Amino acid sequence: MRRIVAIGAIWTCVWWAIVGALVAPVLPCGWATIAAIVAFEVAALLVLVQRFRGVYPSALTRLFVFRPFWYLQLGVLLMALAGAAAFVIGAPFGYGVTVGRAVVLIVATAFTAAALVGYLGSRQLRTRHLIATLPQLPRGLDGLRIVQVSDLHVGPHTSRRFLRRVAVAIEAAQPDLIAVTGDQVDDYPGDVAHFAAAFGHLKARHGVFAIAGNHDVYAGWADVRNGLTAMGVTVLVNDSVAIVHGGDRFWLAGTGDPAGSGGPIGRDVSVAPDIERTLVKIPAGAFTIALAHNPALWPALAERGVSLTLSGHTHHGQLSIPHIDWSLASLFLEHAMGWHVRGSSLLYINPGTNYWGLPLRIGASPEVSVLVLRRDEGSQASIAEMPQPI
């Protein structure tokens, strides 16, 4: 913890020193204002790392300590980098400080505006209706309706009104099966009680299924899993179950998550992904749907004949330009958004039904996905969006 706090404090001081050098002369109270901001951020960091001691932060702490901390961390980074670059460009002409200061103020204004737009975007829940055409789909499964939600990151601070809207959207879709593809909680095992309060009443013909996401692992997977099981959710981790629909049988598989293999907050090998174990019970050639929080697991699933994989994790970067299939997550992941086809295998990446960290979504609306499966022997595997409910 001391190392984390030391690194975080140095990081914070460096960026605010750059910003302060440019704008402190025009700020009320000058450097005293910069010092107060730094003191708040360091204090917030100290509160944040108490999670390693098992301290459970309240809704007020998350709203008025953690959230401002993350806004300031992101904002100061953008201001410092832009201001420093402007200073270097303007310095040879004798306008380094003037240009740097102007750019910092412009970035601060733009960031504030983007934060407001992003907050409004984070509340614009949409229900997306999709047709997944699969030539190998058994006839009895034609019309099977799956509702997927992902990355809900529920905690005591999460808007109860928003969660009710999510629950209503799920119920309105009349699902045969509900798939929750990871990150049910917002980093703490106690959050699972809030998740259960919001969604414990949900039912579907074939049940509600969930898998582990990386934040569920960070929170403490054993506690999160116990909470999900207690509310009646079937949890699949490197496991599969057979389901009969319309007289035909299919298999639903759920993977572990790479965070179990090691990550920023410990590890839990019991939840590390094991594709072979996930599919071991499934007969060769059986129609299979997989739930895999991280879409990086899809290629291995596709190679083993899984027809449809539902993922989340990326949030579409919470900042995307859908028309060119680009998101902030595209900088880090090969499969970051939308749907992908590999042979007869489909992948759909839900953009997340809530947010993590900051309530900021631009071009990546929170989503309840409704996928209806269709059989078409004469076509290739594909997904198409339907403008109206199916």
Image (tube, helix red, strand yellow):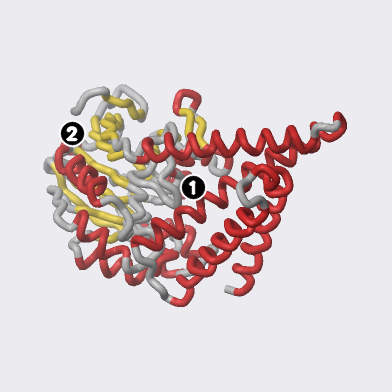
In the rendered structure, find residue 148 and report the number of the disc placed on it.
Answer: none
Helix, strand or loop at disc 2? loop
Mark 1, Cα crowd under 10 Å, few <14 / some 14-19 / many 20+, is some
Q: Which residue does the numbered mark 1 point to in the structure image?
A: 296
Which residue occupies 29% across, 37% down? 125
Image quadrant where one finds the C terminus: top left
Work out whether residue 275 or residue 50 is closer to the camera in this orientation and state it.
50
Image quadrant where one finds the N terminus: bottom right
| Left or right for 165, reference 297 | left
Q: Position of residue 39 (x, y in %)?
A: 59, 63
**Amino acid under disc 2:** Gly
Q: Residue furthest front?
A: 29
Q: Position of residue 388 (x, y in %)?
A: 22, 24
- Examine the rendered structure and indicate whether residue 258 appears above or below residue 85: below
Q: Residue furthest bottom?
A: 53
| Left or right for 34, reference 349 | right
Work out whether residue 300 or residue 322 is closer to the camera in this orientation and state it.
322
**Amino acid under disc 1:** Ala
- Examine the rendered structure and indicate whether residue 170 appears above or below residue 133: below
Sequence-first disc among 1 and 2: 2
Q: Which residue does the numbered mark 2 point to in the structure image?
A: 143
- Examine the rendered structure and indicate whether residue 122 appears above or below residue 93: below
Residue 61 seen in the current view: yes
Tell how many labels. 2
Residue 343 seen in the current view: no
